[in-house]
Image (cartoon, rainbow, N blue to C red):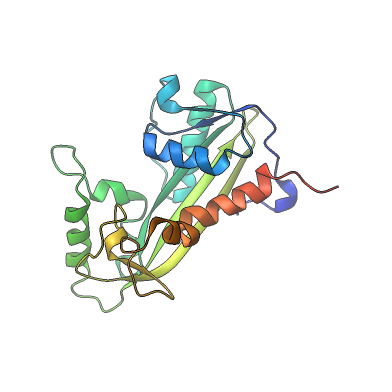
Amino acid sequence: MYEELSMTRLFTEKELVIATHNDGKAKEIAELLGPYVKNFSTSKDLGLPDPAETADSFVGNAELKARSAMRHSGKVSLADDSGLSVKALGGDPGIYSARWAEKEDGTRDFDWAMEKVRKELENHNDSRASFICVLSLAWPDGHIESFEGRVDGVLSFPPKGDKGFGYDPIFIPNGHTETFAEMEPNQKHAISHRKKAFDQLVEACFKPREG
């Protein structure tokens, strides 16, 4: 978490804007926060623009997207930024994880991206990697909260499993023998970087404080 817990602010509004045009991501976030939020809308619903992700960190891009949605909607907005960080590659693909999968025609091919990672690692013996997710919640008065979740592990080739997405088929979390893509979804979600970030977010901003 990027701010001390004592400085966090409870979400008390009736509507939350989810800063995404991705229907799947919006559905997942709405399900996770359903017990705490009455109404949701998304950047797609409201016709909000996608800002250029010009920051050099996960937290920077998450906050940039949250602030953009907040400014255009005038409502509290939640955004995330996530990706795969490979130790031997200096943290790459990192904030460029999705862009590593973009081909010249604009389509995304993660099989191609995973092969790119494999080739980059050919001259390295270090297979350590981490999945990182940052969630940022922005209020119209400029207040913002950001929380980071991460899960550490190793990369394994060739890719295995068909239950995940993105780089899941090459990532084995520490303490496990299966890739994220080989795990049942509920098993992966219980230990994922996104779940860890959401746990912090809910504890700080969506659960009533005692006393």
Residue 114 in the image: above or below residue 61: below
60 lies left or right of 88: right
- Quarter of the image where one finds residue 36: top right
179 lies left or right of 59: left
The residue depicted at 32 percent of the width and 55 percent of the height is 164
210 lies left or right of 3: right
- Say which of 182 and 143 sits in front: 182
The residue depicted at 27 percent of the width and 61 percent of the height is 169
Q: Is residue 48 visible?
A: no
Quadrant showing the N terminus: bottom right
The image shows residue 62 at horizontal and vertical percentages of 47, 42
The image shows residue 21 at horizontal and vertical percentages of 38, 31
- Quarter of the image where one finds residue 25: top left
The image shows residue 65 at horizontal and vertical percentages of 46, 36
Tell which residue pokes out farthest to the right in this image: 211
- Say which of 118 and 18 sits in front: 18
The image shows residue 15 at horizontal and vertical percentages of 60, 27
The residue depicted at 51 percent of the width and 37 percent of the height is 30
Residue 171 in the image: above or below residue 77: below
Tell which residue pokes out farthest to the left in this image: 105
